[in-house]
Amino acid sequence: MTNALSEQALDILFNTARSHNGWQDTEVSDEQLQQIYALMKMGPTGANCSPARIHFIRSDAAKERLLQCVSEGNVEKCRTAPVVAVIGMDMEFYEKLPKLFPHTDARSWYVGNDDAIYNTAFRNSTLQAAYFMMATRSPGLDCRPITCFDADKMNGSFFPDGKIR
């Protein structure tokens, strides 16, 4: 690579980056969320499967539903965040492979293979969640992963059709 990142960029993304417990008292705009998504979606995934699906939570009503799903230690973090991104995995991601990975019949690798679907969706949506955090840091926003939650409650509240978990 000839275009290495600056030390300042490396500090923002890695060296001084931490999981924050509190937030700046600033709004996160739709434009910022679109910018973050535009960066995140370009991160590599296996066979370009890109299974992550994001539900942005801002309203008090949606946050109240979210607070019923997270562990006690994460309630205040979620309540006070200007926006929370719930990142799910699309269990039908393979239906988009003819467009995302068109040079071979990658869809056939998954149809009817629940283990392959789950493992691929889980691994690659987790990668995309990490890309999302890096993209969130790029405009100077704070972020943190929150992984202590009740998955069944989260699915029922935000992904009730079962296609996304």
Image (tube, rainbow, N blue to C red):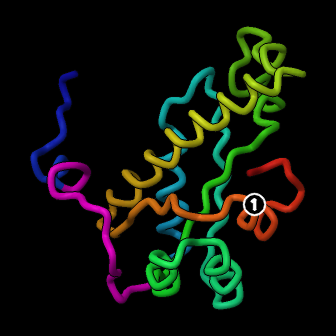
Which span is picked out in magenta? Answer: 12-27
Vertical placement of 119 versus 136: above or below? Answer: above
47 left or right of 103 in image: left
Residue drawn at x 78%, y 28% as measured from the top left:
94
Residue 44 at x, y percent in the picture: 50, 30
Residue 154 at x, y percent in the picture: 71, 65
Residue drawn at x 59%, y 64% as measured from the top left:
149
Q: Label 1 belongs to which residue?
A: 152
Front residue of 73 and 51: 73
Residue drawn at x 78%, y 70% as measured from the top left:
157
Vertical placement of 43 versus 63: above or below? Answer: above
The quarter of the image holding the N terminus is top left
Residue drawn at x 74%, y 43% as measured from the top left:
90
120 left or right of 155 in image: left
Residue 30, by quadrant, is bottom right
Residue 145 at x, y percent in the picture: 44, 59
Amino acid type, residue under disc 1 in the picture: Asp
Vertical placement of 140 versus 91: above or below? Answer: below
Residue at far top of view: 104
Q: Is residue 15 magenta?
A: yes
Secondary-structure class at tag 1:
helix
Front residue of 12 and 124: 124
Residue 91, by quadrant, is top right
Main secondary-structure element of the magenta-colored stretch: loop
